[in-house]
Amino acid sequence: MTQLTLTEKIQGNVARSVNPLGLQQMMVNQIKTVVDHGAYTGAKHALILGGSSSYGLASRITAAFGTGAATLSVGYERPPRPDFLGTAGWWNQVFFKQVADKAGILAENVNADVFLPATKRDVIAAIKEKFGGQIDLLVYSIAAPKRQNPTDPDEVWRSVIKPLGAPVTDDTLDLEHERLVSTTLDPATAAEVAATNHVMGGEDWELWVHTLQAAGVLADNFKTILFSYEGPRVTAPIYHDGTLGQAKRAAEASGRRLQAELAPTGGEALVSVNRSVTTKASVVIPGFSRYCMALYQVEQALGGHEQPIDHIDRLFRDMVYGPHREMDSRGRLRPDARELAPTVQDAVEALMPQITHANFTTDLPGYQQFRQEFRQLNGFGVAGIPNVMAADKFDNLSF
């Protein structure tokens, strides 16, 4: 039997390889986290936009294995080919469906660009054909580099991660060489701010809800939720006060409009301000990885570190469908309150000056946690999982 050796490869802060065996085990581990917490009452038919990784995948897992919900997930991933094993998100979709099918829970995957009108039509057709004609939950968990204008296919908006008004310099992590380097970002132009709002704001979220509503596939008491981010003081210049923060404010305005529209039928549009986590997107934000290293080290000492599955299961179990909603003055759910607690942030701000490019060491507990989580996003560094597999092991899996 032919064996494949799975070699981990990181270029800069981008993983260029995948271990399907590790991703399969990570799926099992995340599902076990939800199952161990027990069942709760929630969604029955859920549409997850961006369900192939991170918060979107965690939302799908808690809906399916916490409430027994049928789930339809849209991801935009590259499948395997003879010279390429595919992306981690593609395998996550496959393995989720595999486990859900075995458990008797309906799960369907759509591999397509979430922004395209054709994708919306395909999803509506699937809801009518396989999901009883209606959904009661829509999760919008999209972090994308670009979006095609739905009314002008020749125009493509591209999002940027930049500050506003003045340049920002910070130390950021180079995972390939395991070092911190100084990075300076120039401020965004007005055109870049507008483009980032088009991609990362709430326009497409509203468009999805309106399209589904017009198609008659939203149940009474339908809920939709978009994931936002506030972040701490130390990352504010590049995030909260930058292009991404502007886009999040636009998304929150979309949420207020949707709430007004859905309320008459018992519906609800929620914005959840989530905690800082290791993702393929967040790792490239200058300064963010250094903050996460300090945060993770403090949380380890305090015993309060959450990964996406822990955070999102708590959000849905306790706040979206439970009685313990933590909301701020702007009506946003705040599961990030634990991270932003003064005791945590004071300790993080005291530790961060000790993590610089001049004295960085890979022995830091926070760095070890951050790197492990990054590696596991692609199936490497998973306990008990080898980096060798049979070439035909997954030949018969369906998407």
Image: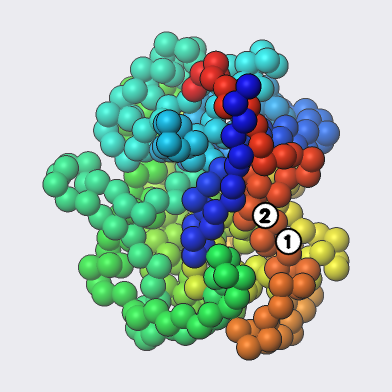
Residue 355 x/y as whole percent? 68, 82
Residue under the point 35% across and 81% down: 186
Q: Please name the residue that numbered disc 2 is placed on.
A: 373
Near-viewer residue (218 or 371): 371
Is the residue under label 2 in contact with that under label 1 (CB below 8 Å)?
A: yes
Residue type at mark 1 is: Gln
Please, is residue 72 above or below residue 200 in the view?
above
Q: Give the label on residue 369, or none.
A: 1
Distance from Cα at disc 1 to Cα at disc 2 = 6 Å
Residue under the point 54% across and 20% down: 395
Please, is residue 181 above or below residue 34 in the view?
below
- For the residue carrying disc 2, how many other residues have a C-alpha within 10 Å: few (<14), some (14-19), or many (20+)? some
Near-viewer residue (307 or 39): 307
Q: Can the viewer see residue 124? A: yes
Q: Is residue 145 left or right of residue 88?
A: left
- For the residue carrying disc 1, how many other residues have a C-alpha within 10 Å: few (<14), some (14-19), or many (20+)? some
Please, is residue 167 above or below residue 388 in the view?
below
Residue type at mark 2 is: Glu
Q: Which colouring convention does the figure follow?
A: rainbow
Near-viewer residue (41 or 189): 189
- Secondary structure beneath label 1: helix
Q: Can the viewer see residue 344? A: no
Residue 94 x/y as whole percent? 55, 27
Please, is residue 253 above or below residue 295 in the view?
above
- Secondary structure beneath label 2: helix
Residue under the point 27% across and 33% down: 117
Q: Quadrant of residue 53?
A: top right
